[in-house]
Amino acid sequence: MTKKKSVGVVGCGAHAQIAHLPFFKKSSECILRAICDSDLRKIDYLGSKYSVPKRYQDFQEMVEDEDIDAIVVATPNYLHAPMTITALKYGKDVLCETPMSINLREAREMMRVAKRAKRHLLLAMNNRLRPDVQILKKFIRQGELGEIYYAKTGWLIGTREWILSPGRMESLSRSGGAFLSLGVQLLDIVLYLLANKRPKTIFASVHKKEAEADVEDTAMCTINFADGTLLTIEVNWSLLFEKDFLYCNVFGNRGAALLNPLRIQKELHNELVNVTPKIAQKNTYRISYELQVHTFLECLTKKKPQPPISSEDGLTIAKISEAFYTSAKKKQLVRI
């Protein structure tokens, strides 16, 4: 019988509370052994809620704990790389939130350390595991939409939905701008759907609503693939509007699809026909979080040499992100 893995979670913010703690606790494949956060009241509350035996304020103490086999890094973006690298060096397997780092140099170092330490480094790319994304992936892979030639995606957040307190603004400034915080999530979905295509060039633009801000609140880009496929991305976290827009549209020469909610249309006998399979739309994220936990633990216990979500995927995103900010700074087209 395979011994259950002991897991620790560092960073107990909203995402950890939604996506990691409840599902690692629920899993029969592991033991939620420890949590770590600088906020003592938070770890006391969450430790009691999820019956977590070990609670740390010092991350160094957590990684030195020999009872912990794997660590989930759910801290702000700028801490992903240093915490992941430290955990890997102490022999821990790691599930790291995306983006894996705030620059390409750190991403490469994370992969180098993981390889040298012979530890697993997976990224929290749960969007790939959503049932609607999986269905669309299957349609594209089987050629149901024909040759994909254009995709567009965006995440536009109204100020009422995301209030930027001084503390939140400081964290965002240190973690990168709107593209790193929002754009990479969308980029991940599209790259997964178009896995057989290679990004070639990017042209990016950014905007700061407040001139003194350290990072952009608006980011847009056009990515050209080697085969001529075109992708556009737009993100913003401070629109003067009362609601969010989150979309991902994919267009082929025989059909098209969109997410949120899933809708697939094909050309049949010169008519456009809705061929969307029935799916439980409300539980897509919950299912993806459960599958993410299972995928990570399955990789650790069965030692799969090729995990379905790996650091290689994150490195590609890091390369594109680096090119994005280079293009925005130089205001010119940049090769990826």
Image (tube, helix red, strand yellow):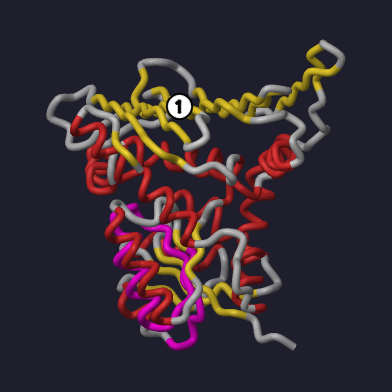
Q: Does residue 238 appear in this view?
A: yes
Which of these two is toward me, 142 or 137?
142
- For the N terminus, the image quarter is bottom right
Relative side of 308 to 187, left or right: right
Relative vertical location of residue 319 with respect to residue 140 in this rendering, above or below: below
Q: Position of residue 217 (x, y in %)?
A: 29, 29
Which of these two is toward me, 249 or 53?
249
Relative vertical location of residue 51 with respect to residue 127 in this rendering, above or below: below
Q: In which image quadrant can residue 36 be found?
A: bottom left
Residue under the point 79% across and 14% down: 272
User: Number of labelled discs?
Assistant: 1
Residue under the point 66% across and 30% down: 147
Q: The residue under label 1 is which amino acid type?
A: Thr
Relative side of 285 to 37, left or right: right
Q: Secondary structure at mark 1?
A: strand
Residue under the point 68% across and 74% down: 29
Which of these two is toward me, 41 or 20?
20
Residue farthest to the left, as pictured: 212
Residue under the point 72% across and 35% down: 281
Residue farthest to the top, as pictured: 270
Q: Does residue 283 appear in this view?
A: no
Q: Position of residue 108 (x, y in %)?
A: 34, 63
* Residue 79 sits inside the magenta stretch: yes
Which of these two is toward me, 274 or 178?
274
Q: Position of residue 156 (x, y in %)?
A: 44, 25
Q: Position of residue 88 (x, y in %)?
A: 40, 76
Residue range in magenta is 66-95
**Disc 1: which residue:** 232
* Residue 199 sits inside the magenta stretch: no
Relative vertical location of residue 98 with respect to residue 213 in this rendering, above or below: below
